[in-house]
């Protein structure tokens, strides 16, 4: 046989072997998997995502949340070594990322499947059971409004800062102090001159602060001034509000439906 | 082994030189097209890399723009360096190596210009599409749906043309580099089509997509970039030091063992994940078997070098190539060990894996490609590199840069993994702990970026014809005994 043919045929065969073994076999094993029904009449698990949540998957993948967040809870028996007189095992579950490990059936309907390979942030397989929609929105808008140490990017571009029409706030508006909302995505602080101007234009500010913080303090002292600024920054803007766009709504809908490690499955027992 | 018994006469040498010139001039256009595009993508990819890297420790950096949010930049970076720089550098190099080793001229070079153009169009759509929000978060396959047709058409032309050049060969002996290239241009298109088909066209169930995804991700490195890199090193090392490769049979064993085992290794990326347990085990076996081809290649490359290390002092091409070849051995050993379950339990989900990936794709592959470019481009343009200093700057920035990169993320990533597995460590502590390591990585990335800019300057100068004409001797770091250094006048 010609050398070239040997190489091509050989390359084909070795390649085909791995395709058969690593792709076709598991494909046949997994392709017929069905949702699980505990007893007749129950809702099958996993459920299909709602339409909103499906759109949220698109937002999640377009913005690469996957590159910081995994969606898989590892086994309770996973990781076994002693350290400091303690057995460190099953950290995922003990961190509260899920009640059980996740198994292939949990991902039945996922397209794309967002298992992830990096845990810069916590696992999200079951995050739907942990937070309220309001928390999710505020966290996405600026994660550092909850944890100063967070390195998660702000997704302020999924939100809109707009004037409040007719003195009535939207129900979905975020409840955040102006330090977060004046310059979305950042943490805002006025310069000294700006602050002086604000004080001059808001004579009632000191009184409002006193009303909100009963007790004695003097606005003339540096400490009192700092408290005044703090108060100003942590109260909401009167004339502007931040509301989620449709994308943010969809994304949060998806996050709330992420409950992969809750419903018991027979094969997840260990 | 094609050994000539009678020494070549001056007339033979002149004839061979004429033939080489003819071959080089037949493929000059497309090869330079690929090479220049590759370097452009390298610069784009490096810029994206630095942006993404800085964002990981300083989240307020460029936070206002949705186009530059971390996730998109991260995807665009991988596409630009993985599919843009690496593949185009490999293809350009493979085209030239195939022509040279087959002693065949390239037919219809215009066709390969079309192929390179298609790839570039695909890549522009790819990177811009991802930044615009069309990325798909399938690692290595993040490109928007409209990109695949360009890449498939391009690689189709390229593969057929490489095979055609091989078929037209006038050199009866088939060197191992040709084996690797021929197999790679066959593997990659099939791999790509099968994967895209099974993830995006066929309705594979959830976890199955991940299995195919990692089968692809690992094989992209193993069956596409690695053969190109190893093949190029097989060509360059003996050629530059003027000695035959250590063992012919070992090179064949290495080739077949790589073909067989590398393709089985990918699923170890999912160890501990929700996949059938036997699958991860099979892949761990494949990964362990990888010791065989790696040791075979290591013996061959390093034994060939034995006794010729002094050449590293003056030859830029060799210095890059040997750095890459040594890293190949190291990174492959590391990869096999990483596939072990106990090890993977710590390293998975951490920056440790990122360090490993860069050691492979950069420390090995990219460095070998630099070596190949330093050797190949002057032969195509007829110009020497205009500054040995800049080459030296390039080498040291990259070598030191990737070393810092690797050490910082390996150490930081390992302890990140240990802390993640300890439920008593609050998550915030882990985030704060890795931050200085990520910062160090940004510094390393900038250093590598400086090297790339130096390289790009050299390439632009060379293409613009600013270097000396070839003939006086190549641009060496220092003058080898009896030869003038770059920039010095030739002895009369």
Image (tube, grey):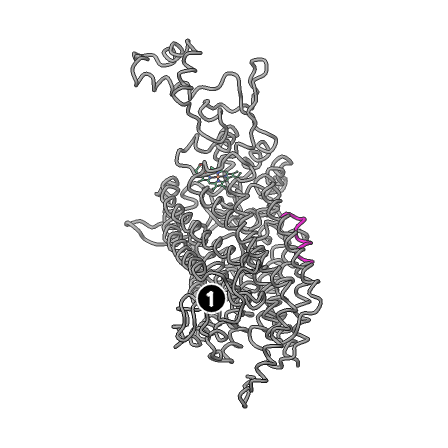
**Where residue B262 sits: x, y (%)?**
53, 66
Q: Does the magenta stretch include residue A208?
A: no
SS majority, magenta: helix
How busy is the neighbourhood of tag 1: few (under 14 within 10 Å), some, or many (20 plus)? many
Depth check: give the residue in front, A20 or B55: B55
- Residue A165 vs B472, above or below: the answer is above
Residue B261 screen position, x and y as percent: 53, 68
Q: What element carries label 1?
A: loop
Q: Name the residue under label 1.
A: B475
The x and y percentages for residue B114 are: 69, 59
Q: Which residue lies furthest to the front in this view?
A: B492
Foreground of the two, A148 or A200: A200
* Residue at the outermost bottom position: B6
User: Does residue B282 show up?
Assistant: no
Locate residue A92 relative to residue A107 in the image: left or right.
left
Q: In which quarter of the image is residue A177?
A: top left
The picture quadrant where one finds residue A228 is: top left
Region in magenta = B144-153
Give me the residue at 42% from left, 47% from top.
B442
Seen in the picture, residue B229 relative to B445 is either above or below; the reply is below
């Amino acid at each position: 046989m010609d050398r070239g043919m040997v190489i091509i045929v050989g390359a084909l065969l070795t390649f085909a072997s791995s395709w058969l073994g690593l792709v076709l076999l598991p494909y046949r094993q997994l392709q017929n998997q069905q949702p699980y029904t505990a007893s007749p009449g129950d809702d099958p698990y996993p459920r299909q995502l709602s339409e909103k949540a499906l759109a949220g998957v698109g937002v999640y993948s377009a913005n690469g949340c996957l590159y910081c967040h995994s969606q898989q809870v590892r086994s309770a028996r996973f990781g076994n070594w002693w350290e400091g007189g303690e057995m460190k095992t099953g950290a995922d579950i003990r961190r509260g990322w899920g009640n059980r490990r996740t198994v292939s059936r949990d991902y039945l309907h996922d397209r794309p499947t967002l298992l992830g390979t990096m845990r810069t942030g916590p696992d999200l397989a079951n995050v739907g059971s942990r937070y309220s929609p309001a928390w999710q929105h505020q966290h996405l808008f600026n994660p550092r409004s909850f944890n100063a140490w967070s390195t998660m990017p702000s997704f302020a571009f999924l939100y809109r800062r707009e004037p409040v029409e007719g003195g009535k706030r939207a129900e979905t508006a975020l409840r955040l102090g102006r330090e977060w909302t004046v310059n979305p995505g950042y943490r805002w602080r006025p310069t000294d001159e700006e602050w002086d101007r604000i004080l001059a234009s808001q004579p009632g500010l000191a009184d409002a602060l006193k009303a909100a913080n009963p007790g004695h303090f003097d606005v003339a002292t540096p400490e009192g001034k700092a408290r005044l600024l703090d108060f100003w920054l942590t109260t909401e803007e009167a004339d502007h509000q931040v509301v989620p766009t449709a994308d943010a709504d969809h994304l949060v809908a998806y996050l709330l439906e992420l409950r992969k490690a809750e419903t018991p499955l027979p094969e997840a027992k260990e | 082994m094609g050994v000539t018994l009678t020494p070549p006469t001056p007339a033979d040498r002149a004839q061979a030189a004429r033939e080489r010139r003819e071959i080089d001039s037949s493929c000059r256009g497309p090869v330079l097209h690929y090479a220049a595009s590759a370097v452009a993508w390298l610069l784009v990819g490096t810029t994206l890399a630095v942006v993404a890297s800085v964002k990981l420790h300083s989240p307020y950096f460029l936070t206002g723009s949705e186009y530059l949010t971390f996730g998109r930049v991260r995807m665009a970076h991988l596409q630009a360096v993985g599919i843009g720089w690496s593949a185009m550098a490999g293809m350009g190099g493979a085209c030239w190596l195939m022509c040279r080793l087959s002693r065949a001229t390239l037919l219809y070079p215009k066709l390969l210009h079309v192929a390179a153009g298609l790839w570039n169009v695909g890549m522009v759509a790819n990177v811009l599409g991802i930044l615009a929000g069309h990325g798909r978060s399938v690692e290595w396959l993040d490109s928007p749906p409209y990109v695949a047709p360009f890449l498939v058409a391009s690689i189709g032309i390229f593969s057929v043309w490489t095979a055609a050049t091989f078929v037209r060969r006038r050199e009866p002996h088939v060197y191992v580099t040709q084996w690797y290239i021929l197999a790679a241009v066959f593997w990659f298109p099939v791999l790509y089509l099968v994967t895209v088909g099974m993830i995006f066209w066929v309705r594979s169930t959830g976890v199955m997509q991940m299995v195919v995804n990692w089968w692809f991700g690992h094989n992209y490195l193993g069956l596409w970039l690695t053969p190109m890199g190893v093949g190029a090193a097989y060509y360059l090392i003996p050629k530059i030091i003027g000695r035959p490769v250590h063992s012919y049979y070992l090179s064949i064993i290495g080739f077949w063992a790589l073909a067989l085992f590398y393709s089985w290794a990918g699923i170890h990326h999912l160890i501990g994940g929700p996949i059938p347990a036997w699958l991860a085990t099979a892949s761990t076996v494949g990964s362990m078997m990888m010791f065989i081809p790696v040791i075979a290649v290591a013996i061959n490359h390093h034994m060939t070098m034995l006794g010729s290390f002094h050449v590293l002092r003056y030859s830029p091409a060799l210095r890059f190539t040997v750095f890459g070849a040594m890293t190949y051995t190291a990174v492959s050993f590391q990869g096999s060990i990483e596939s072990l379950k106990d090890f993977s339990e710590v390293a998975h989900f951490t920056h440790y894996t990122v360090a490993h990936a860069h050691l492979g794709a950069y420390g090995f592959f990219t460095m070998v490609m630099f070596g190949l470019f330093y050797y190949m481009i002057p032969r195509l343009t007829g110009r020497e590199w205009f500054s040995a200093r800049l080459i030296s700057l390039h080498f040291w920035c990259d070598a030191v840069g990737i070393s810092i990169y690797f050490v910082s993320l390996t150490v930081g990533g390992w302890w990140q993994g240990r802390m993640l597995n300890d439920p008593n460590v609050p998550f915030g502590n882990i985030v704060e702990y890795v931050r200085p390591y990520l910062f160090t990585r940004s510094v390393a990335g900038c250093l590598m970026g400086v090297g790339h800019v130096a390289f790009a300057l050299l390439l632009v100068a060379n293409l613009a014809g600013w270097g000396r004409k070839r003939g006086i001797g190549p641009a060496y770091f220092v003058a080898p005994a009896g030869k003038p250094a770059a920039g010095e006048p030739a002895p009369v």
